[in-house]
Amino acid sequence: RSSDLVNTQVLPVTGFPKESLPPNLVSFAVNMTDGTLVLNFDEPVQPTTFNYSRIVLVGGKNNDSESYTLTGGDSISENGLQIILQITFADLNSIKAFENLFTKQSNSYVKFGDGVIADMVGNPSAATNESLQAASYFNDTLRPVLISYDLDMNMGHLLLTFQETVDVSSFVFESFVLQSYSNVSDEDATHKHRLTGGLAESKITELDNRHVTLKFSLYDLNQIKIKKIATDRNSSWLVIDNDALVDMHGEPVVPLLNGINAKKPRNYTFDTTQPVLQQFDVDMDSGLLTMYFSETVDVEKFNVTAIILYDRQRNSTNFYQLTFESVATSRDGPVINVSISAHDQNTLKQIDLLATEINSTFLSVSSDLIADTMGNRLEKATKLKVREFLADESSPRLLGYELDIDSGNLTLTFDETVNVSSIDVTSIALANRQSSAAAGYRSRQLSNNCKASRGTVSSSANWPVIVLNLGEDDLNALKKTRNLTTGYEDTFLFLSPNFIKDMNGNEVVATESSEALNTTHFTSDTSKPTLRSFDLDMDSGLLFLTFSETVKVVETLKINKIMLQNASNFIANSSSQTLSTDPWPFGSRSVSEDGPVVTIELGFVDLNEIKYKQNLGTSRNDTFVSLLEGAIFDMNNNSLVPVTGFQARTQIEDTTMPKLLNFSLNMNTTILTLTFDETVNTKSLNVSRLVIQNAAGSVQDYHSSARKLTGGQNGSITSSDNNHIVVVNLGSEDRNEIKRRRMLAINSFTSFLVVKASAIKDMDGNSVVDIPDGIAKQTALFVEDESPPAVSSFSIDMDGGFFILTFDETIRADSLNLTQLTLQDGAFKIDYNHTLTGGESTQSDGIIIRINLTVDDLNEIKRKHLCREVADCYLLHEYGAVRDMKWNAIEE
């Protein structure tokens, strides 16, 4: 009792009261919710002496158990047997980071090192040999809360700070949403992005702690950039669903709700990293270039001209820079599809050995190509090799064509560049109907006969549009064929697969026989035909006119508008010949069908007139032609361009020997008419080379014997001008010798002509074709001698007693009747006369007859004083006194 103590005598200690035993931990309790350890000792201790770093929390008695040494702490307990230790926030979260440490009573142990705490006299606690299990354990019941977060768009991650350690393995990425505003409607998917799950596309990169780095998957990062979310701090809002994660004791996170407590980042780091082109693919079949970037890029900043394709990585010889016609067809994203324009595709295909296969396709880009959504320009790339290359496997297709029949150009448009060197023009045909089975079907297959550019060829470069220059043969054949390629309605085209190939060797799509392609545009022939050249063949009598195109010969040729002349311009002594329209064979005619070359067969009149003129058509230097307006028209009725004095390209001289076609013999006029097949030079006539005989072969009997004509003073001559008809006037000797022969030239059956080669020549000096004896030509026309003979003169010899009668033609001597002859002294006034009573003719047939007078007649003549002189000597004969060889009686 206290009262007793007061009265009791106080005694001092007799010995030193030294206490040396250390305090020992007897038991402890754990509260993970408030982060405390309740430590119970076997004696009072001083909390101010705590050395927290000597306290080790252990997950079991085994040495290999998880453990954690405290780094600090605090206690507000008073000195005593029980001390409450407040675990630091850092230590508490570090402890929670362990999966098998202080998560339940069975893994909650404590192990003290020396000097954790001291008793009331300063004795430090001793180290424990064994770990002491918690006598009581209270689990963590608080939900984790996101205190703040940092958003780094450059590195592509979120740094999340919770108030406690969270279980990283519990993260549900689909429960995290980044959005542009604090409140985004459920329907607005363009301003928010929920992270994706599956296949660990998002990864936590730090150990379990209250600070967690959530690295976006590349897909999520690109989607965020595509949607233009989180472009700065004010457009970055985080929403977390309550199932997004749990703490180490399974407590779910406190959610961040859209429109309620969505959170902006504490710190925001802008994206400053340049995007990188990582790889690319090329599909030449579809014309697609696919580019793969390291991050989302902004298509609005796409500059296609920054792309250059090369044929090799080193020592490139071929390259091509894309043009603005190619466009990006993708939205913002890490993969950009570029639709290569038709122009760029075709130009690429045009370049040999560029982008034809994987080893000839390399790409360079400059930083101007594109930027990411934050404006960071692309890191330039040099000659990346294509990853995947798809060659062009599509057959080229003819889209349409245009035919210009005026210029002769056929323009074909394909859907891609074609290889002009692969053209086989014979695999294309133009037709007048869409189907080959249609009525009236006509077609023309083009030719590849390129000789003298007459076949169809192309001068185009490799390109989708090529121009076939129709050769003259093809163009003229098209024009010649009626109702073919005259307009849109009769212009159709067929082609076979062999016609052309693309640059990868794919054959063109053929047109079916019933599906010919109609022209998309047709240009009519409006050009007037022109004369290109002309040739004159005087040997065959042909005139060749070569025009620039097919002309309508049969219907439009006007022969009489063609004139041959000997000079380009008319001057003095000019010669010309306008062709005759007389009926053939006299007039000239065309022997050609419609076509570019008109062959005119010169009529007999024209040909011989030309030859007659001697200074026309004898050589190229005197051979010119003029064609008047309307001389001929082309197939589209365009009139010829008139020509004046166009010189011949060639002139072929007449080397053909003239032929005697026929002859006529007029014995009444004693004219021999020779008709040749061409004009002959009458000056070259040698009548001595002409022989008249009574049969094809000569005979030796005198009255049937042949007569070779003679020239000279009394010989046969011609006064004809140069012509194909030559009139020979038989000389007195020839005609009388012919008549003397009683079986020669008395009718057509006894009139034949032998012509020696040198008898006459044509205008070019060609000798006439020989008509030899044995095949002498019979007269075509014979005129008998119907003229009576006449006495041309007479003389009398009174001494000799005879007189001589000279006739104008041969007379038959045996026809002479002397009693019909009377001598008289005057022509009109007669005093004396004497009619002969007889006498004797001493001559044979001929023009001269000698008559010997009888004695009686001579004496009587003398008696009557007749024929004493010329003045009183006249002869009178009666009708029939004598007859010629045709028995024509002399007239009275």
Image: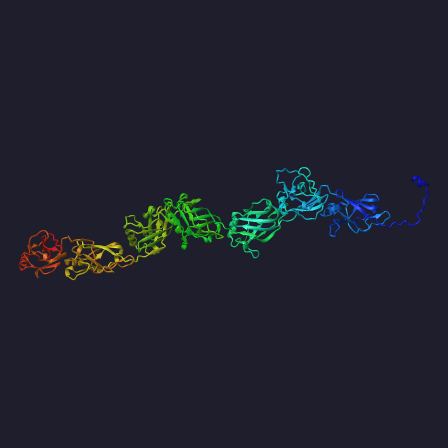
Q: Is residue 525 left or right of residue 205?
A: left
Q: Is residue 281 visible?
A: yes
Residue in view at x 70 percent, y 48 percent: 207
Q: Position of residue 563 (x, y in %)?
A: 33, 50
Q: Is residue 537 left or right of residue 759?
A: right
Picture coordinates of residue 83 (x, y %)? 81, 44
Q: In which quadrant of the rendered view does residue 816 lie?
A: bottom left
In front here: 160 or 344? 160
Colour style of the rendered protein structure: rainbow
Q: Determine if residue 641 is in view.
A: no
Percent of width and height locating residue 624: 35, 52
Towards the viewer: 579 or 138: 138
Q: Of 329 and 767, which appears nearest the observer?
A: 329
> Which one is in front, 676 or 353?
353
Count the labels in the image.
Answer: 0
Residue 86: x and y in percent read 78, 44
Q: Quadrant of the N terminus?
A: top right
